[in-house]
Image (spheres, rainbow, N blue to C red):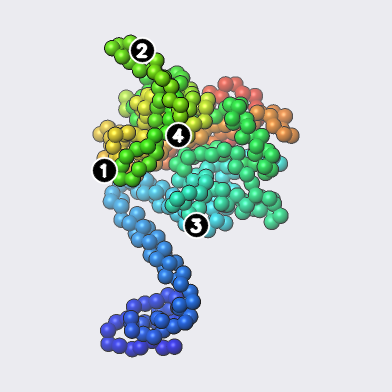
Amino acid sequence: MAASRLGTPGLRVLSGTLRPGRSFTPGSKPFCSRASTSRPLNAQRLAEKLRAQKQEQKTKKMPGSRNPVQRRVQELVRFTQQLQRVHPNVLAKELSRGILHQDKDIVVINKPYGLPVHGGPGVQLCISDVLPILAKMLRGHKAEPLHLCHRLDKETTGVMVLAWEQDMAHQVQELFRARQVEKKYWAITVRTPLPSAGIIDIPIVEKKVQGQQQHHKMTLAPSYRMDDGKMVKVRANRDAHVAVTQYQVLCSTPSSALVELQPVTGIKHQLRVHLSFGLDCPILGDHKYSDWSRLAPQKLSAGTLKKLGLQQTKARYIPLHLHARQLILPALGARREELLLACKLPHFFASSLRRLGLDMPSQDQSGGSEGRRVEAE
């Protein structure tokens, strides 16, 4: 069906009964044809495509692109957004490239930045969505889906364990619950924790926060408070969870530090809350817990911003510098020895260390483990 030829320029369409590129006006009959009305989702798909293009153009127009550091930050932001829009097969292939270890019981991957583990509001693609595809890539088309053994936050990178069988996943999860899995995280903090090593044993509770939209955040629920210079025990919050974190400063400058964290318990956002509120040293890029009273990015010192090559208004683009560096699994299943898995730092993390003048430790303090060490790029 041909479009009406009028004097005024027509719109361009990509679907319907017209061929691509054919012009039409609001008064043209083909726009109301039976073929177009039978496909009501075309408009929705077109709207989603336009929103994605608009967001991509907005990202490309972020100011400060002349600065090489800001360009790298912007590239990471774009990469994070692209992970949510790629085909599941593409994401599964990317995860397969980052496999740290696999045997007949488990598969250990290097989790990328910005990729959620589970689905939820606004999540278009997550790790759990592509586990069936990843299993088929590794074992063929008849393979059963892999199973999650634990989770990491969306912005956290590093070691993550999957299991081939549901029973094995339950066994690994029980090891995590029984605190038999040794975990080590590396984080870059704003300011240096004092003392340089210690244990944070402060309960954590989830509270409602009033803002533009009501939401929840994790915060401390201490068992003691200071009253006229004396320590007074307070009534325990029935909703609070026991949270214990061991930490050690690996290297530091007057304005920042590389800190190794060993969570004894596994409470949601435990490391971020303990560092921000317990030690007053938020993780670099942690915009959620860097300032409790305002929903604004953390205020970085002029020296730190200069080293990172950023302006204060661009601090919101700094990614969270929290990396699951190492994990030690006890002997399990057919494996007779403990398995030590170490994952090298992502590029943006290592680059920030160099720019901030923080030295990479010469070797990990793994406590003299005799288990088999697996380390991946």
Place of residue 71 in the rendered image (x, y in percent of width and height, measured from the top left): 35, 48
Residue of label 1:
313
Residue of label 2:
231
Place of residue 43 in the rendered image (x, y in percent of width and height, measured from the top left): 42, 70
Mark toward the viewer: 2 or 3: 2
Q: Quadrant of the C terminus?
A: top right
The residue at the point 37 percent across, 37 percent down is 208
Residue of label 3:
86
Question: What amino acid is labelled 2 in the image?
Answer: Met
Place of residue 73 in the rendered image (x, y in percent of width and height, measured from the top left): 37, 46
The 10 Å Cα crowd at callout 3, few under 14, some 14 to 19, many 20 or more, is few
Element type at marker 4? Answer: loop
The residue at the point 66 percent across, 34 percent down is 171
**Image quadrant assignment for residue 231:** top left
Residue of label 4:
269
Mark toward the viewer: 1 or 4: 4
